[in-house]
Every structure is written in C-alpha cells, then in structure tokens.
C-alpha cells in the first residue's frame, strides 16, 4: 500500500484519474481512500461531473429525461409489447387477435400516423396526447394505464417518442380550441343547429342520418375494414367522450381512418363546431 501511495505522489493526479475512470475491482483495491487528500477528492468530483455530462449528452437529452426513457422502456416491455410489439410496430404476439379482420389493430408507432391528437391532421401528436390515450385507455381495445401514475405514463410516452417515433413531438397546436359560450353553450337550439350541420357537412353519409350506423364499405390505411362509430353510443368512442374530447375529434379527425378533420371547414367560425358536439350529445341523451 505504501508503494502505491508514493506512486501517486510521484506521478501526480493524472494517474489517479486514469485509475478512477477504469474502476475494475483490482484497481479500486489499490486505492486507499483514507489517504485521499482534498485535491484528490476534488478530482473525483470532477470525474463524476464529466461522466454525468456524458450521460446528459446521450441523444441531446437531459439526465432526467434519459432516466425517464429507461423507466418507460421497462414499463413498455412489461405492459405494452404484447399488443404493440417489441419494436412498436403493432405486431405483438396478441395483436392479431384484436383485429383479425377489421380495424383497429394496435398502432404501428413507427409509421408516424396517429389517431388521437390535438394537432392538425397529418401531424405528430403532442406528448400530452400520447399521455391522455395511455391514461384513459381505448374502450374495448386497450386498458387504461392510470395505475402507472403520471410519472410512469409520461415515461412510457417519452419512450415511444424517443425509440419509435424518433422525431421531436410538437409542443403546440395550430388548431383553435375555443370554449363553448354564448349561443354555443348546450341548448336544444344549439343541438338543432348541429343536426342541420350534420347533414350540410355530410357527416350522415358515413354515420347515417340517425348517427347509428352507416357505410359498410370503408377501409383504414392498412386496408382493414372499418365502420364509422355509432354516435349514439358514447362507450364506443376511442378519443374520449367529454364535450372537449368530441370537439377535438371533429377538428382533428382520426388519422389513418376515413374520419376527416374539419378544422379548415370551421376556420374563423370555430364556435359553431360546438353545435355539432351538442347534436352528438343529444343523440346520446346527454
Ligand atoms: C390489449 C392490447 C393493448 C395493450 C396491452 C396496449 N395497447 Fe396501446 N393500443 C392498442 C390498440 C388496439 C390500439 C389502437 C386502437 C385504435 O386505433 O382505436 C392502441 C393504441 C395506442 C395508442 C394511440 C396511438 C394513436 O393512434 O393515437 C397509444 C399511445 C398506445 N396505444 C400506447 C400504449 C402503451 C404505452 C401501452 C402500455 C402501457 C399500451 N398501449 C398497451 C392495444 C393495446
Ligand atoms: C368518410 C366517412 C366519414 C365522415 C364524412 C365523417 N366520419 Fe366520423 N367517423 C368515421 C369513421 C370511420 C369513424 C371511426 C374511426 C375509428 O374507428 O377510429 C368515425 C368516428 C367518429 C367519431 C367518434 C370518434 C371516437 O372517439 O372514436 C365522431 C364523434 C365522429 N366520427 C363525428 C363525425 C362528424 C361530426 C362528422 C361530420 C362533421 C363526421 N364524423 C364525418 C367516418 C366518417
């Protein structure tokens, strides 16, 4: 041990740094921690900061983000891969049993096509959109993962973004989310105006005049058969059933399905989209 100490003194802190970096058990035995002076302690701290910086620079991510993505990976491999597949391509071992002949199957996250967004048609979802879907689940197809807690939900959403989407997600949207107020708060009159819009905008061509059924000849982007949602049954809605959720669905549409977004049609008169929302609510007796 004494030899080693004198070695340190002779060759200075450089050697110490090298020994510290390559921390194999043999070398750490050689280090006599009790004999470390202040300078050596400082050196150790500096090494630590360097290594932290390495981790931080990993993919330009903050250290906390890297940790979150690692946690998200663990969650994904436990709770999601059976349906979404290890590579997020929607081909997990049970995916075929979910939609053998018809829509939906679990998403292929690498395709960049997302149904449930608050962003324009064709755009990627925001992180909060992924989080909402994971938190709420999709009735009939995907369980709610509320029990992961907000941290867990965010981590696994970040993992999907980093690992499968591999693009920066938008943090804002150009779609106008106006509140329903004045003549557009819920009223029989607003719902009635909505019933007119439903025909004028040709929603009925797919959803039927009563909103119940509709066209049977539609296909999704994977050429799987898809039926318009029965608008009288809120339990079949995948994108949420609150007033705000239905407004969002109408504005953004559901990418990858024939359901178009009507953001452009309502440009400048976003308020009147609430009439349609109220009509749909009235179909459900709400
Ligand atoms: C039982 C199968 C199943 C499991 C388990 C599952 N999912 Fe899903 N998931 C689906 C299906 C099916 C869809 C597509 C539903 C649709 O298109 O209406 C989907 C859609 C999604 C979407 C929406 C993408 C879009 O288009 O907007 C996200 C995000 C998602 N899943 C994340 C997860 C995460 C994260 C987990 C694990 C914590 C998970 N899923 C577990 C079946 C599953
Ligand atoms: C070209 C056909 C088509 C037209 C036109 C259309 N839809 Fe749809 N809509 C669909 C399909 C298909 C679905 C089911 C998508 C799915 O299963 O994810 C759907 C789903 C919906 C949903 C339920 C979304 C959810 O949460 O699952 C609502 C609400 C809706 N449409 C409202 C409307 C309104 C309002 C209009 C007119 C402004 C309209 N649709 C026009 C085909 C259409």
Image (cartoon, rainbow, N blue to C red):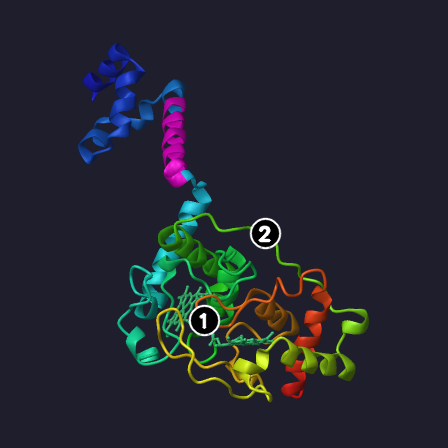
- In the image, is 76 to the left or to the right of 201? left
Assess mark 1: CB under 8 A from ligand 2?
yes
The circle drawn on residue 43 is none
Q: Quadrant of residue 227?
A: bottom left
Q: Earlier in the sequence, mark 1 or mark 2?
A: 2
- In the image, is 79 to the left or to the right of 203? left
Q: Quadrant of the C terminus?
A: bottom right
Vertical relation: 237 (above or below) 57: below
Residue in front for this viewpoint, 240 or 61: 240
Q: Position of residue 206 (x, y in %)?
A: 52, 81
How packed mark 1 is, by other alpha carbons closer than 10 Å (few <14, some 14-19, many 20 or more), is many
The circle drawn on residue 257 is 1
Q: Quadrant of the N terminus?
A: top left
Q: Residue at x 38, y 60 (%)?
A: 109
Q: Which residue is mark 2?
A: 172
Vertical relation: 35 (above or below) 207: above
Residue in front for this viewpoint, 12 or 178: 178
Q: Residue at x 36, y 66 (%)?
A: 80
From which residue to which does the magenta span run? 42-59
Q: Residue at x 53, y 69 (%)?
A: 260
Q: Position of residue 63 (x, y in %)?
A: 43, 41
Q: CA distance from mark 1 to mark 2?
A: 23 Å
How packed mark 2 is, by other alpha carbons closer than 10 Å (few <14, some 14-19, many 20 or more), is few
3 inside magenta stretch: no
């Amino acid at each position: 041990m004494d030899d080693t100490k004198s070695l340190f003194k002779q060759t200075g802190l450089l050697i110490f740094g090298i020994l510290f970096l390559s921390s194999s058990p043999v070398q750490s035995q050689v280090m006599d921690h009790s004999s470390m002076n202040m300078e050596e302690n400082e050196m150790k701290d500096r090494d630590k900061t360097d290594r932290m910086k390495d981790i931080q620079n990993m993919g330009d991510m903050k250290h906390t983000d890297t940790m979150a993505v690692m946690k998200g990976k663990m969650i994904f491999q436990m709770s999601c891969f059976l349906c979404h597949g290890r590579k997020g391509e929607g081909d997990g071992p049970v995916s075929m049993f979910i939609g053998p002949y018809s829509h939906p199957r679990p998403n292929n996250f690498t395709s960049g096509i997302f149904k449930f967004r608050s962003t324009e048609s064709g755009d990627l979802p925001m992180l909060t959109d992924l989080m909402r879907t994971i938190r709420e689940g999709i009735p009939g197809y995907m369980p709610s993962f509320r029990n992961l807690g907000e941290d867990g939900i965010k981590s696994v959403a970040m993992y999907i973004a980093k690992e499968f989407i591999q693009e920066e997600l938008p943090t804002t949207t150009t779609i106008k989310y106006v509140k329903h107020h004045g003549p557009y708060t819920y009223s029989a009159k607003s719902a009635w105006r909505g019933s007119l819009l439903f025909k004028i905008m040709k929603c009925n061509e797919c959803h039927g005049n009563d909103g119940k059924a509709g066209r049977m000849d539609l296909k999704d982007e994977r050429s799987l058969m898809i039926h318009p949602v029965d608008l009288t049954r809120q339990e079949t809605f995948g994108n949420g059933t609150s007033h705000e959720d239905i407004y969002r669905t109408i504005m953004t549409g559901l990418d990858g399905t024939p359901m178009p977004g009507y953001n452009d049609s309502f440009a400048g008169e976003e308020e009147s989209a609430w009439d349609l929302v109220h009509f749909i609510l009235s179909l459900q007796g709400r």
